[in-house]
């Protein structure tokens, strides 16, 4: 029997809005430890009525390129309305999950974080001056930091509620939550970055000398992302991580890159670094774990970059033996399949990390420089503070969420007994709206 769904629940019986049949079950479920103390919120109802106003890389670039005070304040007010709108939709999604599911401590924690952020954001008055903007940026920065563990919490939460929801529903929920989170962080981080640019000594119209460090960036968007350079950088970092996990004696495969090595396109580098880092890590891991090459230099990972009029396609091929039939059907699932069960046994508590390679701020990247700036620490220390072999098991589905968010795609073709070809397609013109809705048919 399916668990009850119940909107706007609270522990106070007078606030129960559920039909009587569901109410009994909800009462029983309310006894579950960690259940969130939901409060009915007419403000939430109001904000849920609003539609998200989609962004594209191109729109963000045009907007941020000629930055005036009035544009900066317009941007701040866009964030001010957009963030609570987007959070409101996700709060409503969580409220429509079965109560026993959201009683899970990790999911309840995420719900509370979002409710707190929603209440904080919706109360921000119109931003009319640079001082208002400074105050607003402080709120944004604090909230971004507070939400750093959302991904591992969601990942652990959905693993723990396996069996209480259909896997397709769980995956749809996760896809929507993660896309929405990416979108909110893009909006917030873009505004913070534009504010930094506006306050920087190089900022147009005051001064724009040749050495302006922002010349190829508009906020978080790097206008000339070069796939080859990102593959090289991610390859190096991943090799270091794997050496740290397996010992320096381990024989790692080389990474060969060929094709359109000069292809550039506008993108948020950290998104690409997450996806490519994950794919290369999977490939190297598969190759070194294949007993056949034990002790000897394994065959290289082959990367092919192909540029077309609309896309850049990156194919990453390994000879790591392919993906087992046991795992293949669940490759894109956040909760189903044998690898998830094993992970759950290994992860007794929430890891003290941000959850993604991107959020670990890979050394040498813009993200890592920002991280150093904010934390005053070295990016290497942030990498070493994370157990190098810790994996939440969501790397691939998460990579696909990143790829699809900017209208790209990620496909995996497994050649059983031989290896894997991963195809990452990037929409190179930046003119496609962010994809907030999930795939029509979940194939997880
Ligand atoms: C999140 O990171 O989960 C967010 O909701 C981002 C928001 C605080 C700007």
Image (tube, grey):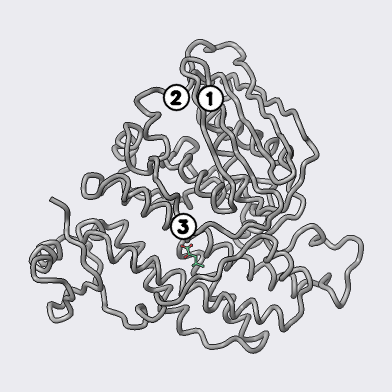
The residue wearing badge 1 is 420
Rendered-image quadrant of the C terminus: top left
- The numbered mark, 2 or 3, whose residue comes first in the sequence reads 2
Image marks 1 and 2: residues in contact by CB distance under 8 Å? yes
Q: CA distance from mark 3 to mark 1?
A: 28 Å
Query: For residue 122, which quarter of the picture?
Result: bottom left
The residue wearing badge 3 is 437
Left or right for 364, reference 335: right
Residue occupying the point 50% across, 49% down: 401
229 versus 39 height, above or below: above
- The numbered mark, 3 or 1, whose residue comes first in the sequence reads 1
Left or right for 436, reference 252: left
- The numbered mark, 1 or 2, whose residue comes first in the sequence reads 2
**Front one among 256 and 45:** 45
Q: Secondary structure at mark 3?
A: loop
**Front one among 144 and 182:** 182
Does the rendering let one see residue 334?
A: yes
Q: Secondary structure at mark 1?
A: strand
Q: Which mark is residue 168?
A: none
- Dot 3: within a 10 Å radius of its alpha carbon, few (fewer than 14), some, or many (20 or more) residues? some
The residue wearing badge 2 is 323
Residue 175: percent from left, percent from top: 42, 52
């Amino acid at each position: 029997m399916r668990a009850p769904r119940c909107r706007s629940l609270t522990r106070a019986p007078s606030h129960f809005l559920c039909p009587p049949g569901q109410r009994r079950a909800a009462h029983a479920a309310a006894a579950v430890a960690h259940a969130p103390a939901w409060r009915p919120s007419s403000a939430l109802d109001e904000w849920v009525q609003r539609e998200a106003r989609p962004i594209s890389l191109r729109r963000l670039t045009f907007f941020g390129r000629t930055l005036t005070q009035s544009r900066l304040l317009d941007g701040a007010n866009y964030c001010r309305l957009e963030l609570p709108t987007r959070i409101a939709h996700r709060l409503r999604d969580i409220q429509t999950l079965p109560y026993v599911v959201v009683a899970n401590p990790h999911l309840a924690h995420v719900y509370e974080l979002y409710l707190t952020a929603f209440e904080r954001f919706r109360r921000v008055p119109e931003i009319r001056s640079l001082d208002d903007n400074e105050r607003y940026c402080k709120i944004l920065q604090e909230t971004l930091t507070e939400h750093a563990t959302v991904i591992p919490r969601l990942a652990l939460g959905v693993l723990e509620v396996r069996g209480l929801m259909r896997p397709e529903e769980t995956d749809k929920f996760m896809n929507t939550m993660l896309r929405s989170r990416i979108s909110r962080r893009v909006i917030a981080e873009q505004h913070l970055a534009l504010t930094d640019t506006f306050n920087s000594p190089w900022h147009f119209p005051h001064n724009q000398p040749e050495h302006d460090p922002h010349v190829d960036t508009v906020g978080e968007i790097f206008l000339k992302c070069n796939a080859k350079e990102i593959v090289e950088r991610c390859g190096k970092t991943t090799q270091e991580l794997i050496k740290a996990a397996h010992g320096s004696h381990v024989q790692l495969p080389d990474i060969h890159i060929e094709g359109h090595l000069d292809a550039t396109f506008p993108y948020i580098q950290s998104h690409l670094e997450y996806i490519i880092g994950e794919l290369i890590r999977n490939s190297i891991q598969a190759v070194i774990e294949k007993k056949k090459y034990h002790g000897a230099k394994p065959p290289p990972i082959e990367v092919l970059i192909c540029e077309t009029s609309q896309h850049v396609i990156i194919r990453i091929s390994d000879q790591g033996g392919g993906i087992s039939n046991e795992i293949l059907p669940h490759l894109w699932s956040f909760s189903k399949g044998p690898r998830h069960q094993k992970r759950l046994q290994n992860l007794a508590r929430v890891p003290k990390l941000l959850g993604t390679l991107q959020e670990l701020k890979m050394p040498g990247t813009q993200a890592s420089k920002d991280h150093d700036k904010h934390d005053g620490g070295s990016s290497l220390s942030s990498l070493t503070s994370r157990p190098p072999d810790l994996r939440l098991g969501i790397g691939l589905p998460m990579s696909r969420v990143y790829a699809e968010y900017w209208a790209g795609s990620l496909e995996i073709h497994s050649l059983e007994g031989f290896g894997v070809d991963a195809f990452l397609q990037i929409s190179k013109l930046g003119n496609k709206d962010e994809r907030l809705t999930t795939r029509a048919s979940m194939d997880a």
